[in-house]
Each structure stands twice: as C-alpha cells, then as structure tokens.
Amino acid sequence: MLRIGIMGATGYTGLELLKILGRHPVAQIAWLTSESNAGQCFGQVFPVPPPVADLPLFALAEADLSAADVVFACLPHAAAQAPVAAALAAGARVVDLSADYRLHDATNYQAWYGVPHTQPALLAEAVYGLPELHRTQIKGARLIANPGCYPTSVILGLSPLARGGWLKGTVIADSKSGVSGAGRSPSLKTHFVEANENISPYSIGRAHRHLAEMEQELGAQSGAQSGAQSGDEPGQGAESPFQVVFSPHLLPVNRGILSTIYVNLPEGVTEAEVREAYRTMYAGEPFVYLLRPGEVATLNHTVNTNFCAIGLTFVPGTPTLIVTASIDNLIKGASGQAVQNMNLMCGLDETCGLK
Ligand SMILES: NC(=O)c1ccc[n+]([C@@H]2O[C@H](COP(=O)([O-])OP(=O)(O)OC[C@H]3O[C@@H](n4cnc5c(N)ncnc54)[C@H](OP(=O)(O)O)[C@@H]3O)[C@@H](O)[C@H]2O)c1
C-alpha cells in the first residue's frame, strides 16, 4: 500500500484527489490537513459518504509527515514552499499542486508571484509534472511540480508545433475556465450573481502568471529562449521567436477548461505535416486524444475525465491554424494529473485510478 498525506485537503483539488484515490488500488489515506477545519472530520466540510466522511482533519503542524509515502500539497502558492520542503525532509515523495515549484528560476518566481522563493535548491530539483513531456524525469523524481490548469491545455495544445520549430510571432491562447478553477474561497468574481449568466475576461494579454510556465515549457521544446524569463517584469517578454498572448475567461460552469489557440504557421508548412507531428507526439499517450479533421474540442469531450482532447482547424486561404484543447481543470488540470505523476514516480501503471 502507498500511504498518502494531503495538505490542504479541504479545497476543490483535495476533494477531487480523495475521489480519485478512493478508486486507486494501492492508495491508503494516512492524514489530511486543513487549518480552519482542524479537529473536524472531512464529512463536516464536504457532503461525502463514509468512509471518507469520517477521516479526521489535522492542522499542518500536527500532521505526522513521516507517516506518508506520498504527500500531495494542495495549498495556495507561497503557502506550499515550506511544507513541501518539510515533507521531503521527512522522507516522502511530493506532488505539489500549487505554482511554487513550477518555474525553474527563483528570480523569475519572485517576479511573477511577488514573494521570494525560500527553497531555491528544491526549485532546481523539481520536475515539471507534465507526463507527455517529462515522463522519464518524473519516474525518478522526489518532487513534482504539478502543472497549472490553463498551462496543461495550452502546452499540450502547442507542444507538437514547438517541437517542429513552427511557433513564430504572436500565438494567441484564448482560454475559458469553470469557476472551480478559482478554488473554494469565495470572492466577488466567483459570487453566483457575478459569475452566473456571464463570461468575464481577466488578466488578459501578458499579465496572467500561468504565462510564465507556458513559455518556459514551450520555449524549452522549441530550443528557443522562453519569452518569460528570469529578470523580466511580468508582462514583458525577452527575445524569443514566439510570444504567447494569453486571455483567460471565467465561464459560468463548475468545471472544465477550453483553450482556443491561434497560430500562424510558417510559409511552406503543410496541414499533412502538422497532423503527422500531433499523431507522432501523442501516439500511445493514455490521456491525450486527437479529434478527427473537422471536429473541435468542447468541455464535454473531457469533463470528469483525465483526458485532454485536441482539435486542429486549418483556416483555408490563410496560414492560420486554430487549436482547440479541452481538459477538466480539477482532473487533468490538477488532481488527476497529480495521481498520474504519483503512479509514475512510484513505478505503478500510469493509469491506476484514472480510467
Ligand atoms: N482549482 C483548480 O482548478 C486548480 C487547478 C490546478 C492547480 N490548482 C492549484 O492547487 C492549489 C489548491 O487549489 P484549490 O482549488 O484546491 O484551492 P482551495 O479550494 O482554495 O483550497 C486550498 C486549501 O488550502 C488550505 N489553506 C489555505 N491557506 C492555507 C495556508 N496559508 N496554510 C495551510 N493551508 C492553507 C485550505 O484550507 P484551510 O483554509 O482550512 O486551511 C484548503 O484546504 C492552489 O495552489 C491552486 O492554484 C488549482
């Protein structure tokens, strides 16, 4: 059995993890944490049936870190830095769902997240946990930085183009997310009356923090310098053959992300070559599927699953390719991918608990 600890179990990603791990053949919950609900049991926070309802909640300081083989950190960014280091020191493998270990460079982290990184040595060790890109490194890792939800859809949607050297100029990612993407703490933006029957763009252009990891990962694959590098101010790109303009929107649904991404292909690159690049990269991938020509990805292709669905639309008479990529933000965009990473780290079948 694998003993599991979840830090920040009373958020939406924690709830989703518990659902997935409940179906997992070798996972056994060792402890769960919550600061504001410590001393209660999980069923007092979420309406779930036993036995999950009866699991006790501990404050982080009271959790027995050494009682877990694998720790999932489902904490807000900045709050995860020190607890992740403590779990590693106690001998656990860690999957961090926050943004704290996704960027390779501490200066870049501070520029985007507004706080210093207190564990720069661990930043160098952390593996960006997108199995379709880094499966080999994930298998030997102690610390996985689970990717952001929007970046999962955009990076999977664009990676075959980055590898082909076909990302040039401005790439526009227009992304839409269900409200659970903002976490469980209520805010004006996620208030029912504000979100329902409405669609709101926010942090559009080059202002959203997820841009940094998108360009880090796409830049590395294209062999180019990332456009969001150490020392950049947020919103300013360095030398790069491409720049992502990223416009997230809040959708009035509970869950799901759809990214519609516009790319101008370089002259001479054909539809057949591009389709072949996508087929080659994703052949055999258990959780990425390509739609047939003429089909576009929708939320319904992936909601409640660990899949990413990708559609390719070539606009006749123009160099424009429109990539549509959908995921469930809480599963492939968070907890499902986290379990996929745990499976790989622990030498299990990658799909355990996920199909
Ligand atoms: N929601 C998504 O779709 C999604 C997708 C990908 C990644 N993520 C990332 O995953 C992480 C968790 O997201 P979420 O949506 O589950 O968030 P959430 O619903 O807001 O839950 C956050 C959890 O952390 C605990 N917490 C909050 N502040 C804390 C602190 N200072 N110290 C210790 N515990 C604290 C909360 O419980 P108490 O308040 O009781 O302590 C709660 O259990 C975030 O970093 C988020 O950016 C989320």
Image (cartoon, rainbow, N blue to C red):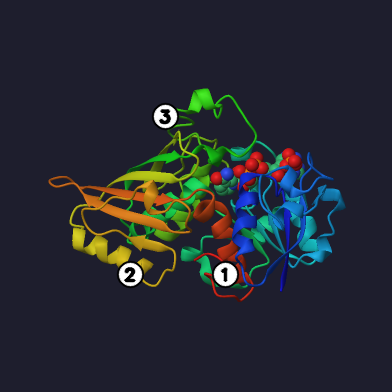
Residue, disc 2: 280
Q: Calculate the distance from the C-alpha at mark 2 to the C-alpha at mark 3.
A: 36 Å
Residue, disc 1: 137
**Front-most of residues 245 and 153:** 153
Left or right, 298 with respect to 236, comes to left
How many residues crowd mark 2 within 10 Å: few (<14), some (14–19), many (20+)?
A: few
Residue, disc 3: 199
SS type, badge 2: helix
Left or right, 275 with respect to 309, comes to left
Residue type at mark 1 is Gln
Residue 1 versus residue 335 in the image, above or below? below
The disc at residue 176 is none
Of circles 2 and 1, which is in front? 2
How many residues crowd mark 3 within 10 Å: few (<14), some (14–19), many (20+)?
A: some
Report whether residue 90 is seen. Answer: no
**Front-most of residues 295 and 85:** 295
Residue 234 versus residue 25 in the image, above or below? above
